[in-house]
Image: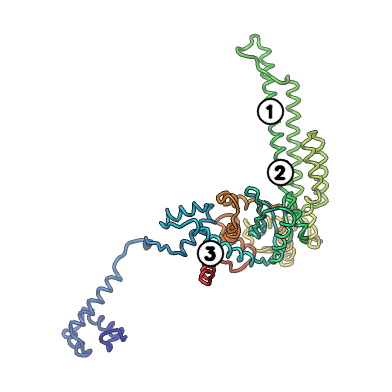
Amino acid sequence: MAHYRLPHLDLSTRFQLALQMLNPLRSWGEATELAKEYQVSRKFLYQQRDKAEAGLLSALAAGSPGPEPLSTTLTVDREHLQKSIVTLAVAVPASIRGIQTCLEAILGKSRSVGFIVQTLQRVGEAASQENQTLSFPKPVLGEADEIFQGRNPCLTVVDARSFAILQLSPQAERDSITWGVSFLSLQDQGVRFQDLACDGARGIRAGIKEAELPVPIRPDLFHLLQEANILMRRLEKKAYKAIEQTYKARRAEAESRLPKRRCGRPLKIEKNLQEARANEHQAINRYDSFLWLQQEIRQALEPWTPSYRLTSARQARETLETAVTLLKEIGDADISDYARGLLDHQEELLAPLVWLEQQLVSHRQGLDPTTEATIIWSYKHRDELGLDKPGQGFPSELCPVVEAFWQALDTFHRSSSLAESLHSWLRPHLQAHRGMPDWLMPLLQLYWNHHTFQRGKRKGKTPLSLAGIDETASWLQILDHLLGETQMESQAA
């Protein structure tokens, strides 16, 4: 306590003196005795009393209710500006001019376009290096698709298990060598594919073949079946038109039987009532037949039946072949072309079911149908049942079988829909910048992999945490890391 003018009176001694002076029951003359004992004046003791009393009143005074008000001041330094620029670029599809306007309108800071571009380029380079160090502990269920901005293609590869972006590769061409090099770079990075799903893009398939990836290729089921939706809408439209024609023919015939014709022009009809009824019957039957056959095809390709039994690949093949034969008998040229397309892709459509059967063939031996149905039913309703891990609630001897079923069903893969869903998020960014700057894709990939999902079954988790990577940094933490690296590089330069 050397800072006091009276060094022999330390803090604890001053506490005791202040308490004795605050005591309303102290004896007469006690202040004089204390002054003599500690060699101070009586005025000093009363000053200590007043200071202690003021401090207690200030600490114990009633405050305003509710939480403390937020600070009304914001310190906008260089680091804060850089964070704002990068966040506006990736979290909001803002152009360079838009970022400049936001900085001036919200933060009251005017920065040139060159400063903003240089900041994004430096952070984008650091983000690219960070993305290349990413490795996944488990084999990924790859989904590949292409997105274009103008004539510039970009290969998008995501993991269906975690919705993490494995690569965003903008290139000048989309030939087999270009995409093959992109797949090889993922392989060199340590990414192991369990399978790879893509649509009918020839460049991607040629790139996979060029890279000689030892993984099965899964065609996108919904791309193969999307033609059915177009045919279904067309047949439905024809059926409603035939119904309308029958209604008009019925009205025209009823009017012709009236003793006096109504005023106005006579009702025009294309066919008489008998022909209209025949056409209506044919159109409705054609639509109903196609709808029923399409539902049968769709159900035959599901991993389990409505009774929660594993779908047999042999039975699915027979159902598909029978449905194709019946589709050709409908008598429509477009439907026949669609049926031939299904037959051409038959092996690819059935490949996931064949794989699933092979994975579980040893575990299904001696398993009764009721138990198998219960295992598959529990897998489908695991979220409603609150089952955190496979085998929960089952006898201990069945736990390995349940775990094998759940593992196989988790990795049952047959679409690239997540890659296309990601493109709906990428598209506004590409349109805002009217292209693919070098810094954009690495930053978007890094932001997506470290951002937290706000809703849905992935709520509260990041794509990297869903991929099994422990101790993943949040977006703000990774942004601080990137800005720190760029500042160190600029100081070293």
Q: Earlier in the sequence, mark 2 or mark 3?
A: 2
Q: Of the numbered discs in the image, which one, if any, rests on residue 241?
A: 1
Please name the amino acid that badge 3 sits on.
Leu
Q: Of the numbered discs in the image, which one, if any, rests on residue 181?
A: none
Q: Earlier in the sequence, mark 1 or mark 2?
A: 2
Disc 1 and disc 2: Cα gap in Å?
23 Å
The residue to which callout 2 is attached is 226
Picture quarter with the N terminus: bottom left
Nearer the observer, disc 1 or disc 2? Answer: 2
Residue 234 falls in which quadrant of the image? top right
Tell me where residue 323 appears, x and y as whole percent: 80, 42
Q: Residue at x 43, y 56 (%)?
A: 110
Tell me where residue 204 appears, x and y as whole percent: 73, 53
Q: Residue at x 56, y 66 (%)?
A: 473
Q: In the rendered view, does 268 fall on the left or right side of 59?
A: right
Q: Note whether 465 is above or below 424 in the view shown.
A: below
Tell me where residue 404 appears, x and y as whole percent: 74, 63
The residue to which callout 3 is attached is 479
User: Dot 2: within a 10 Å radius of its alpha carbon, few (fewer than 14), some, or many (20 or more) residues?
Assistant: few
Disc 3 and disc 1: Cα gap in Å?
59 Å
